[in-house]
Image: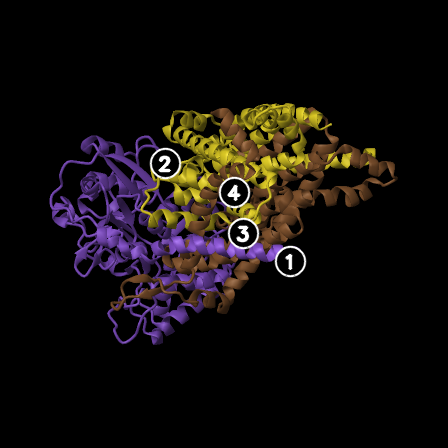
Amino acid sequence: MKRYHHAAIGALVLVLFAAACGSSSKGTGSNATSGGSTSVPTLQAIGKGEGSLSVLAWPGYAENGSTEKDVNWVTPFEQATGCKTTVKTFGTSDEAFNLFHTGAYDVVSASGDSSLRSVANGDAAPINTKLLTNYNDLWVNLRAKRWNTVNGVVYGVPHGWGANLLMYNANVVKPAPTSWSVVFDSKSPYKGKVTAYDSPIYIADAALYLMKHQPDLKITDPYALDDTQFTATINLLKQQHSIVGEYWSDYLKEQEAFTKQSLVLGTTWQVITNLVQGDKTAPPVKAVIPSEGSTAWSDSWELYAKTKHPNCAYMWMNWITKPDVQAQVAEWFGEAPANLKACALTKAKDHCSIYHASDQSFYNKLYYWTTPTAKCVDGRTDVTCKSYADWTAAWDQIKGS
Amino acid sequence: MRRRVARAFARHERLRLGLELSAPIAWLVVIYIGSLVALLVTAFYRLKTDPTGLITTIDSTLHLDNIRRLWDESVYRTTALRTLESAGIVTVVDAAVALPLAFYMAKVASRPARRALVVAVTMPLWAGYLVKGYAWRALLDPSGGALHEIFGHTPGFGFASTTIVLSYQWFPYMVIPLYAGLDRLPDSLLEASTDLGAKAGRTFRSVVLPQLRPAIVAGSIFTFSLTLGDFYMNRIVGGTNEFIGNVVYREFSVNLPFAAAYSLVPVAIMVVYLLVARATGALEEL
Amino acid sequence: MYLSRPARWCLRIWCALVLVVLYAPIVYVARLSVNTAKNFAWPPSGFTLTWWQRAYHEPGPRLALLHSAQTGLWAAGIALVLGTLAAFALTRHSFFGRTPISLAVVLPIALPGIVTAIALLSAFQRLGIDLSLETLVVAHATFCVVIVYNNVAARLRRLAPSLEEASADLGGDPFQTFRFVTFPMMRSALLAGGLLAFALSFDEIIVTTFTAAPSYKTLPLWFADNFSRPNAIPVVNVVATFVVLASTIPVYLAQRISDGAATFSAETRG
C-alpha cells in the first residue's frame, strides 16, 4: 500500500512538471536574441523629452547628490530637460549586462567587456551620432573603437577611461615593482596578500603578461586567444590562485583590505588608490603601470534597443559628455574624461595630465577591455578564438581550483 | 444567500477543498513551478556561435552538453561538494547551538524572560544581511580585525569564515522552529519522564529529541537551502572561496543554459532532502 | 523537567554567550554609526553624530525603508491568504495529490534564492512583463507562503477538529465557525507567520536584485548600492542600527499579542 502511494506521488510530480513544462516551453524557444526584432527605429532628431529616464551606471557616474550633497549633475539635467531620472548602480560588468538585459533601463555606462555582449544579444541600439552635440570633441582614440562599434555602426558613446594599475603597499613591497611578474610568481614573498580582479576579463591581464614574457606563444592581442594561448594563460592564473588572498570586485573591499594591510599588492583602479591615499590611517600605497603595459577600460553609454524614452536618452548622452559635466565626473570618479575640453574645467588643473587623458604614448601601452569572440578580434582567420563564454567557464576553473 | 453558500460548504467537502486549494495552487504551481520548469528545460539548451563568430545565441534543441560539462569537469563537483559541506556544517552548528538556547527559552525561562529572548533572537534578522556581513569582515580580518586583537587568532578569509558567517546569518531561522517545537512539547511529558526516574540527559535523548525531530528538520531546511544558494558572503569574507551560487551568478549572464544546469544541482539536493524529510514523517509536522 | 542548579546555570551561560555572539556584529555596526572614520575597519575611532544627522536629512534611506515596508506588507499579506488556505486544505483534507502540493508549498523556500530569482526573472522576460512593484511582490510572496503555511498548519494540527465540529453541531455555519472558533485560536499563529514573512521579505536581497524595478530600491538594495560608493558607509551603519532599534517595537508588540493568544489556546487545549 505504502509503496503504491509513493509511486502515485512520483507519477503525479512528473505529470505536474510535464504540464508546467508543456505550457512554458513554447516561450522558451525564443530566447535573448529575439530582442532585436522589435527594436525601435534609430532616432533621426531629438524631440520633446518623455519626462523620465532610467540610468544604469557605474557608481559615481550619475550622481544626484545622494552620495555627497554637492556632487550632483543629475538634478541639473532633470531641471534642464524635464526628464525625471532614476539611477541604478552596478558592481561588475556582468551585473550591468544582466540588468541592462532586463529592459528596465534606457541607458547604461558599459565597459568594453559587456558592451559587445549587449550589442550581440540585441539589447543595445545603434546610435545616431549626428544627434550628439559633443561627439566630435571626444578623444579620437576612444571613438568608433572595437569595444563600442560593430561593423562601422556606433553602439556606444565614449564616457571616460582608466588603466588597470598595479597598486602596492610601499611599506611592505620592496623593491617597488616594475613588472606584473610580482603578482604571477608562485613563489611570491607576498603570498596570501595578493589580489586580482574578480572577473573573467582579468584573464586578459595574464595574457598580456605572457604576450610580453613568452613570445613563442605569439599572443598579439590579449583578447584574442586561441586554444594553446588560452591554455597557457589559464595555467598561469591557476598558479596565481595559490598566492591570491582575495579577489575583489567592489572597491570598498579592496580599499579596506589595503587600508588594513590584509592585501598589499595587486590590480586596482586609480579611484581606489585615491581613496586609500586619502585615508590617514592607511599605509602609503602607490599605483603604477608596469613595464608590460596594462589592460584598461573605456566606458561607453549604450542605448537600450527598445527604450521608451529615446529623446531623454539622447539628451542624457549629450549632457554627460558636456565639458563641464565631464570635468565633474572625471574628478569625482577618478578617471580620464573622454571630452578633452573638460581638461580646462577640472578643479585640479593637472587632472588630465595625471590621468594621461590625451597622452598618445600612454595610450599605446594600454589594451582596452573588449569582449572576446570566437572570431579572433586580432583579425586571425585561420583559428577560432575563445569566446567570452569560454573565458567565463575558465574563470570557474580558476576560482574553483 | 450566505446561508445557502454556507450550507453548500458544510455539505460538500470537495467544494471547500477546491476553493481553498485553487488560489495557492494557481500561484505556486503556475507561477513558481512553471517558471522553474522553464528554467530547468533551459538546462538542456546550449550556446551556439553564429557563422560570423561575433554573436552567441541559445540553441533551443535539447542536448546534454551542460550535464556532460558538469560531469566531466571536476571543478563543478568540487565546488558543489564544498557548498554541501558548508551547508552541512552550518546546519549542524546552528542546531547544536540553538538547541540548548531554545530549550532554555521554552522550558526554563520565566514568561517575561521568554518573551524577551524570543525578541532578542529574532531582532538580528532586521539588521541587514549585507551590513552584518561587512561587520563580520571587520571582526574576522586577519590583519588587525577584532578577533585577532582580542583572541590573537582568526580563521582569515576563506571557507571557514564563510561558514561561520553563514551560521551566524541563518541562526534565527533554526532557533524559531526549535523553540516552537519545544513549546509544543507538554511539560507533563517531561515530568512523567522524570517521575519514572530518568535523569535530565536521558529525558532529553529519549523524550525531547524524538519529539523535536520535525522541528529540527524544519530549521535545517532553512539553514541548508539558504547556504546552498548564497553567494554574497563568499564575496565579503570568503577570500578566494566559491560556492555553487557564485558560479551560477557568474554564468547566468553569459551562459544561461549552463547556469540553469548547474542550478539543477542544488534543486536536486533539496528535492531529495525534502523527500527524505517527508519519508521520516517530518515534513508532515513542518 | 527537573534540572539541577548547575544545569540551569550552564543553560543560562550558554544563552548569554549565544546572545553575545549574536549581537557583537550589531553592536559593532551601532558603534560605527558614530565613528569618525568612514570605513568598517577595526578598531573604531572617535565619536560623532554627523552621520545620524546626515542620514536624517537624506531622502535615500527613508524611501528605501518605505519601499521595503511596502513590499514586505504586500508579500506578507498575500502569503497570509495563500498560506492559510493551503494550510487548511492540506491539514483538514486528505486527497490525491496532497503530497506534491505540500512539496510545492515548501519548494520556494527550500530551493536556493538564486534559482528562484533566475527562474522568475526569465519567466517575466519571456512574458514581456516589465519589472515593477508587482513583480517584486509576486517573487517575495512566493517564498513567504511557506512561512505562514508552516505556522498555521502547525497550529491546525494541534487544534482538535472536534471544536469546530462542536460548533457545527451547535448550528454554527462554516463562516461563523471560522470567525468565532477557528480564527481566534489561530490568531497568534497568523501573527507569528505574518511577522516572520515580513521580516524575510524585508531583508531579502538575492531574489530582490533580479525582480525589483530599477527605481524601486528596497533597503537591502540601497545597502548594496552604497557599499560600492565612497563615503557612504557611515550612513549605512546608521540606517542599519536604526532599523534594529525600530524593529523592537513591532516584534515586542506581536510577541505580547501572540503570547496572550497562546495562553488562550493552551487553556482551550487543557
Q: Please state the chain letter of the residue tagged with numbered disc 3 in the rendered image.
A: B
Where residue B242 sits in the image (x, y, percent)?
Answer: 50, 56
Label 1 sits on what residue type?
Answer: Arg
Q: Which mark is residue B228?
A: 3
Where residue B78 sits in the image (x, y, percent)?
Answer: 54, 62
Q: Are marks 1 and 2 in contact (CB under 8 Å)?
A: no
Q: Does A177 sit above or below residue B135?
A: below
Are both tags, 1 and 4, on one chain? no
Chain ID, yellow in image = C
Q: Which mark is residue A3?
A: 1
Q: Which mark is residue B133?
A: 4
Across the whole image, how many numbered discs are drawn on residues? 4
Chain ID, purple in image = A
Q: Please state the chain letter of the residue tagged with numbered disc 1 in the rendered image.
A: A
**Residue at image location 31% in from the left, 64% down from the top:** A223
Residue nearer the viewer, A265 or A134: A134
Q: CA distance from mark 3 to mark 4?
A: 17 Å
Q: Which quarter of the figure is the N terminus of chain A placed in? A: bottom right
Q: Are marks 2 and 3 in contact (CB under 8 Å)?
A: no
Q: Is residue C56 left or right of residue A302?
A: right
Q: Are marks 4 and 2 in contact (CB under 8 Å)?
A: no
Chain ID, brown in image = B
Where residue A401 sits in the image (x, y, percent)?
Answer: 51, 63
Label 2 sits on what residue type?
Answer: Tyr
Q: Secondary structure at mark 1?
A: helix
